Image (cartoon, grey):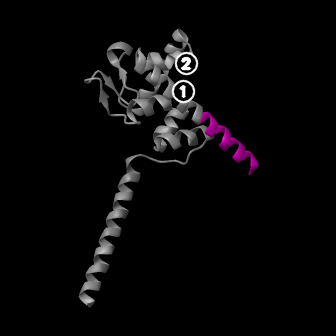
């Protein structure tokens, strides 16, 4: 009986240390800071990655970029799509839009420029459709992206009101 208890205590201790070590390794992966702005907090709700949320929140069209990254890759910066033609969180095709780096900062900077060019060329709502291509799938993509942006704007209003009440 005593031997079983000793083995159980040892097992719990080892598992506890492994969890602690895994947690420390995760923290070393990238520095995490608390969300600083309401916009960043709203983006964090969608993307669940503090570093990515902080990068996106620094840019114009932050909610639009969040919606695009969610729909295109679920915020996976290393992903490739379209048989290797598209890359990164925003699934940008380098042969069309030019080369860019692999970091979240580089990808987000390129996505801002691409989205801004579509807005100036096609207007705000149509920019989402053009970002995805054309046709019925692109129209559905536009609706989904606009719905996500609206949800984030509503969440921002809610958090702003809550912060002002305190």
Is 90 included in the stretch rendered in magenta?
A: no
- The segment highlighted magenta reads 152-166
In this image, 37 relative to 45: left or right?
right
Which quarter of the rendering shows the N terminus?
Answer: bottom left
In the image, farthest residue toward the bottom: 1
Q: Residue at x 24, y 87 (%)?
A: 3
Q: Residue at x 52, y 47 (%)?
A: 33
* Place of residue 91 in the rendered image (x, y in percent of width and height, measured from the top left): 37, 25
Q: Which mark is residue 5?
A: none
Mark 2 closeness class: few <14, some 14–19, many ≥20 residues within 10 Å: some
Q: Secondary structure at mark 2?
A: helix
- Look at mark 1 in the image and give the residue it sits on: 146
Numbered marks: total: 2
- Look at mark 2 in the image and give the residue it sits on: 125
* Place of residue 137 in the rendered image (x, y in percent of width and height, measured from the top left): 40, 21
* Place of residue 151 in the rendered image (x, y in percent of width and height, measured from the top left): 58, 35
Please tell me in which quadrant of the rendered image residue 135 appears.
Answer: top left
């Amino acid at each position: 009986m005593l031997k079983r208890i000793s083995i159980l205590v040892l097992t719990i201790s080892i598992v506890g240390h492994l969890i602690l070590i895994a947690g420390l390794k995760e923290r070393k992966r990238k520095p995490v800071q608390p969300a600083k702005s309401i916009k960043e907090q709203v983006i964090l709700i969608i993307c669940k990655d503090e570093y990515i949320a902080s990068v996106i929140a620094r840019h114009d069209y932050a909610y639009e970029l969040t919606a695009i990254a969610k729909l295109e890759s679920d915020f996976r910066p290393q992903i490739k799509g379209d048989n290797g033609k598209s890359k990164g969180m925003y699934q940008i095709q380098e042969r069309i839009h030019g080369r860019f780096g692999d970091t979240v900062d580089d990808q987000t900077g390129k996505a801002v420029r691409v989205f801004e060019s579509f807005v100036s060329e096609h207007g705000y709502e149509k920019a989402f459709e053009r970002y995805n291509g054309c046709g019925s799938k692109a129209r559905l993509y536009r609706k989904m992206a606009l719905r996500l942006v609206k949800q984030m704007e509503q969440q921002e209003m809610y958090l702003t009101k809550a912060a002002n009440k305190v």
